Amino acid sequence: MTRFADLVSTARACLVADDGDLWGISLADVSWMGIEDDRILLTADPCRPGYAPDGQGLWSGPRPPDFALGSTSLEWAGRRWAASEFSFHDTDKAAVRELLHEAWHVVVQPQLFSDITSIETTGVPGADLLDTANGRTWLRLESVALSRALALVGTDDEWRSAAADALLFRRRRGLHATAAEAMREQNLDIAEGMAEYTGWRLSGASPQALAEHVQDLPDGDEVSWVRSFPYHTGPAYGYLLDATGSEWRRRLQVVKDLQALLSETVENHDLAAAETRGEAYGLEGVRRLETAREKRQQAKVDVLRKRFAASRVLRIRWQRNGLTFRPGQVTPLDIGTVYRHLAWRSPDGCELVAPGGALLTPDWSEIWVPLDASTLPDGSPPSLPTTLNGDGWTLRVTDVWRLRPDGDAWHVEPMP
């Protein structure tokens, strides 16, 4: 509990020092919630039984049944909270940045960017671009160019050349994007990128510190950039726009395009120059690596499609609350989007924990997990409450829900 109190104190001091200057709105009165195992820590009195003050300016009590582990903004006890699974972070700096990130979602986004959301866009046509060789190659180069530009901010005006390259590589990637995917990326750079930018800026991080983070894109076959890229690109574009000295944050509320705003102040290369300018960023080596990864990725996509489309599934008619997932582990399919390490809790105590992954349908109405022969083997509904176990998931079902068969599938849904 002491660590969360210290983190809150540091984050609150950052907001007080800002005094609303960054976005024209004060974030200093935000209510934070720390989620830790089966309890929560609060910076405001929820006025509910079971939650007591701890003497350090916090209230603590049991984690409500519909609160999944994870960091998000949520409505509860008559107010909106900036919730953080703070123990997930190894360093206090990262944990403070997350508190500031979630504060942006609670205070700034509803007032200035209410029409832009990150929930949830991975079902649009072409949303798998950043899992393909073309998408990942040009994103890699964009990130390296952004990092180079950030490293030069404050030393000389050479940062503008690297920033122009970043914009060029972004436009080159756009040749492979559907209109819906291009808009998805543009919006996520605001919906998540500006929250992340706020965390870095208000915690006092330098452009050079951010440069290391931006270039260090998490990599590996198990890592996806489909949903995680704006945590790197968004704050980078924000810092570079700061270096222009323009009133870009005010204009962003109208223009809603970070790249368009930056392109007003740096050179705009002809798109045909992307291949040539990419050579200075290791284009050919990156392309070879990503082409090989794409082949491996396609094999994994085929396995996932078989797991969720060609097999028996359990279809949970969830209520669009209490869901958490890891942004770096998201795979779009034609039948929905697979989220590894997904967790969901309902207000009445149903709980799904799916470290092996679960699929959300494109309309976000259902969560699917695969059924095997050992789950519901005799074809008759079990008595409730019960706990079901499958390949890579566990589901607790309370007695105000029901299970019903539907051909090879089973439905889990609230009682009518």
Image (cartoon, rainbow, N blue to C red):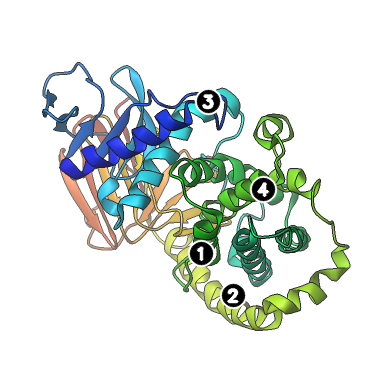
Q: In this figure, which residue is indicated by the disc labeled 2?
A: 294
Of helix, strand and loop, which one carries label 1?
helix
- Which tag, 4 or 1, sits closer to the chain's start? 1
The quadrant in which residue 35 appears is: top left
Compared across the picture, whether 305 is left or right of 398 comes to: right
Q: In this figure, which residue is indicated by the disc labeled 1?
A: 212
Compute the Cα span from label 2 to label 4: 36 Å
Q: Residue 243 carries which label?
A: 4
* Cβ atoms under marks 4 and 1 closer than 8 Å: no
Q: Is residue 198 visible?
A: yes
Which residue sits at x=52%, y=28%? 108
- Which tag, 1 or 3, sits closer to the chain's start? 3
Which residue sits at x=87%, y=68%? 272
Compute the Cα span from label 4 to label 1: 17 Å
- Residue 275 in the image: state x and y as whole percent: 80, 74
Of helix, strand and loop, which one carries label 3?
helix
In the rendered structure, which amino acid carries the disc numbered 2? Glu
Instruction: Mark 1: give few (<14), some (14-19) or many (20+) Cα within 10 Å.
Output: some
Compared across the picture, whether 302 is left or right of 81 comes to: right
Q: Which mark is residue 110?
A: 3
Which residue sits at x=53%, y=45%? 197
